[in-house]
Image: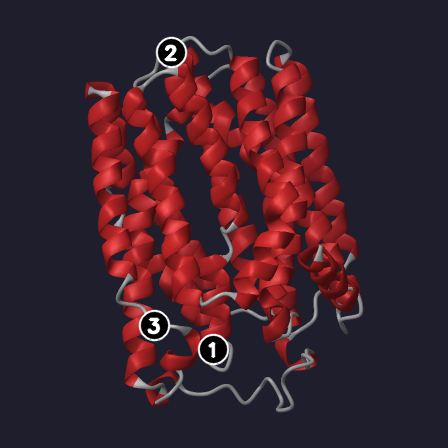
Amino acid sequence: MKFLKDIKTELARFTKLKYIREIMKINIMFFLFFMISDSMDVFIPLYIKGNQLPAVLYGALQTVTTILRMILIWLMAKPKMETKRRIVIIFFAINVLDFGLLKLGNTYIALYIFAMIILTRTLFNTIMNPYLARLLPNEYMGIGFGVRDVFLSLGCAVGLIVSGFLTKNPTGFIVYIIILLFILFVMLWTNSMLEIDEINTDDDEEDNENLKSWKDAPARLKWNFVLIVLIGCLLCCGLEVHDYSAMLGDDIGVTVQNIYNLYSSSVIITAIFSIVGGIIIDRVNAKAMYIFYLLICFCSCFVLVFGNVYAYALSLVLLGFKGVFDNVEQTYFFKLYKEYDMERLYSANAIIQMVLSFAAPVVFGWLYDVSYTLMVTVGVGFMIAALLCSFGISGEKRVQEK
C-alpha cells in the first residue's frame, strides 16, 4: 500500500513539472507513432515470409537501412530543434504519399516503403528522446520515461490489435497507417519545439548553454561510455533473435492474428507496469537495474531454444517485462551526460553501436534460413557476453566522483 501511495505522490509531482504540457504532447506523438511502428515490426517479416522471400532479404533490408540510419543520426545531432522538426515533417509527408504504393505488390517498392518507415522511426526517436530528457529534471528522469513508455506501449498494443483485425483487409491496413501518419504530420506542423537555450529545467540553476567539454570529463566517465557502447552493441546483436520471432510463430502454426494478439499482450504488460518500472529505476542502484534488465533480455531469447508454442508465448511475455525496464539505459545515460553535449553523445553512442553490429541483421537472417535453433543459440551467446560486460559499469555516484 505504501508503494502505491508513493506512485500516486510521484505522479502528482510529475504533473506539476514546468514543461508538463510539452512533455504530454511528446507522449501523445509517441502513442500515435508506435501504433504504426510495432505493427510494421510484425508486418514486414510476415510480408517477406508470405511472399516466399528468403529471411536473409529481411536482414539485408535492416543492414542497408543501418547505413542510412547512421548517416541520419549523425546529421541530426547538429541542427537546431526547429530544423529537426521540419525534417521530421518532411519524412512523415513522404510516408503519407508513398505508403499507398504498397498496394501494387511490387517487392522493390515494398522494400523502399519499409526502409522509409524504419528511417522515420530512427529519426523520430533520435530527436524526441533527447528532447524529452532535456525537459525532465534528473530526479524525474525514470518516471518521465516510464510515463512515455506507457503511452508508447499503449500505442503498440492498440496498433497491434487493430493490425491483427486488418490482416485479411490489406487496403484497410494501408488506409489505417496513412491516417496515423497524416495525424502525426499535422501535429508536428502545428506545434513548435523549444530550443535548448530556452529550456531551464527545475534541477539546473545554470544556463543550459554552458555545457561541459567532453575533453574535461573524468576518465571513469569516458570508460563508462565505452562500456555502455559495447553492451549496447552486444544487446543489439542478441535481440536480433526477436526480429525473427514473428516468423517462428508462423513456422510453429500460430495464426497471423494470434501473432499480433500475442505481441499486443506483450506491450500491454509494458504499458501496465512502465510507471512502476520508472519509479524503481529512479530509486534502485543503476548498476543493479542494468544487470537485471539484461537478465530479462537473456531469458526472453533463451526460452525460444525450445521452439514450441508455450516457449514462444513465454518469450513474448518476458519481452513485455523487458519493455517495463527499457528506459534503464536511456535514464542512466541521460543522467550521467546531461552536463555535456548530450545530443551529440547520444548520436555517437547510437552510431558506434550500429557500426559494431552492422553485419548482424544479414548474419541472423542467414542463420534463420539455416536453422532457427542455431540463430537463437548465437543470440543467447551475445546476451551472455553483454551480461558479463555489465558488471564493469559503475553506479551513478561512483562514475561522477572524479
**Image location (x, y in percent) of residue 329:** 44, 60
Number of numbered discs? 3
- Work out whether residue 340 can be spotted: yes
**Disc 3: CA contacts within 10 A as few (<14), some (14-19) or many (>=20):** some
Cβ–Cβ under 8 Å for marks 3 and 1: no
- Specify which label sits upstream in the sequence, 1 or 2: 2
Amino acid, disc 2 = Ile
Above or below residue 99? Residue 333 is below
Of badges 1 and 2, nearer the viewer stands 2
The disc labelled 3 sits on which kind of residue?
Ser
Q: Nearer the viewer, mark 2 or mark 3?
A: 3
**Disc 1 and disc 2 in contact, CB within 8 angstroms:** no
- Badge 2 marks a residue whose secondary structure is loop
Q: Please say whether residue 366 is visible from this viewpoint.
A: no
Residue drawn at the location 61% of the way across and 14% of the way down:
170
The label on residue 394 is 3
Q: Earlier in the sequence, mark 2 or mark 3?
A: 2
Q: What element carries label 3?
A: loop
Q: Nearer the viewer, residue 144 or 131?
A: 144
